[in-house]
Amino acid sequence: MNTIAEPNFRNPALANERLDSIADALAHGKQIAMVIEASSHCDLACDFCAAHSPKVPDKIFGIVGPVTKQKKHMSAEVFAGVIRLMKDQPPLKMMFFHGNGEPLLNPKLAELAAQVKTTGVAKAMTVVTNGTLLNAQRFVALAEAGIDIFRVSLDFMTPEVYKAVKGVDRAARVVGNLEECIAAIRERGLNVTVSIECKEWQDDATRDEAALIVEHFTPLIADLPNVSVRKTREHNWIEQANKEAADGAPYRRRLPCEQPFYMMMVHSDGDISMCCVDSKKELLIGNANTSESLQAIVQSPTLRAWRKAHLQADFSQLPACSQCDLASSVDQPLYEHREYLIRLIDASQPSQ
């Protein structure tokens, strides 16, 4: 499919499938997916980013305290800890490489992916990148290392708009890199999926950048069914959710979120958060080097309690979650089936 496509987590047709996957994971005490923050550095300054935006008043890097966030690449030692956690565990459905930074800034990214492939700790891998460094050479190296899906955040074709939102103009470079990647797929017969991503802006109907992206790339990908353009809705993220809603009232979450049941994140220093949106490390549940195993993290009292709080839509002890507007097609079904899912959490509790 080469036309604009919604992300899977927003697709209503996939809601039941995703709910079933969550129920199965809860019943068997396993994790569905994981985000690896290969780097917390970034070469852009997107104004919608919770970590690197100049509009975020409370910078997450260098916060004084026990959970200080640092700008760094994930080391081989930390990633070895991640692999250790998943030893003898069911493989993840997906391992993602993204987080609060640009993963391709880590020069060892292909080596990390190759370890995942060799050990079999995940069935598939996705890289989410801004595309500034994704030339044909890096693309082929990552594909050969085992990356299955590339999500490339182009977002804008117009240089002025790109620079206004992302801090610097890299539009032409990303477009050129994507064209190289498309050519490499065709020339080498690479069995990978590429999603060219564009933002769906809620507050500015005149920004029709998505149409420009579709117009440019449609002729280039017409014969490549695994390459498409995909739109994603702009999020407030945790820090930016403090702004007032359209009616003047502060935003407050009213439904569960899929993320605590689906995708935890390993920060570049090894700390593990319940959710990939946890820029400030307010939702820590473990550490790649000190936790016993992935199963121990999944079945920990902290994560179990936070998941039950989400199902009950009780965010009184989770202020970061209460002000986050990330939503999916599964949020309402999670609430409707909360009693059943809570029973699954209780039934899978490890014996003392």
Image: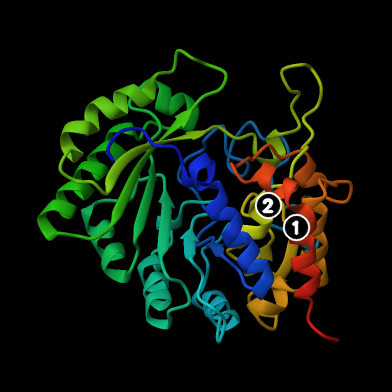
Along the viewing direction, whichever of 288 and 199 lies nearer the viewer: 199
Number of marks drawn: 2
| Residue annotated with mark 2 | 278
Question: Residue 283 got which mark?
Answer: 1
Which residue corresponds to the image point at 60% horizontal and 35% vertical from the top-left?
235
Q: Earlier in the sequence, mark 1 or mark 2?
A: 2
Secondary element at tag 2: loop
Residue 160 point in image, percent of width and height: 39, 21
Along the viewing direction, whichever of 42 and 246 lies nearer the viewer: 246
The Cα–Cα distance between marks 1 and 2, rounded to whole angstroms, is 6 Å
Along the viewing direction, whichever of 343 and 242 lies nearer the viewer: 343
The residue positioned farthest toward the top in the image shown: 206
> Would you place residue 155 above or below residue 70 in this image?
above
**Residue 295: quadrant of the picture:** bottom right
Q: Amino acid at mark 2?
A: Asp
Viewport quadrant of the C terminus:
bottom right
Which residue corresponds to the image point at 30% horizontal and 23% vertical from the top-left?
212
On the question of residue 287 being in view, the answer is no
Residue 190 point in image, percent of width and height: 20, 60
Residue 158 left/right relative to 283: left
Secondary element at tag 1: loop
Q: Amino acid at mark 1?
A: Leu
Residue 272 point in image, percent of width and height: 66, 66
Pointer 1 with pointer 2, Cβ within 8 A = yes
Viewport quadrant of the N terminus:
top left
Residue 66 point in image, percent of width and height: 80, 63
Residue 251 left/right relative to 94: right
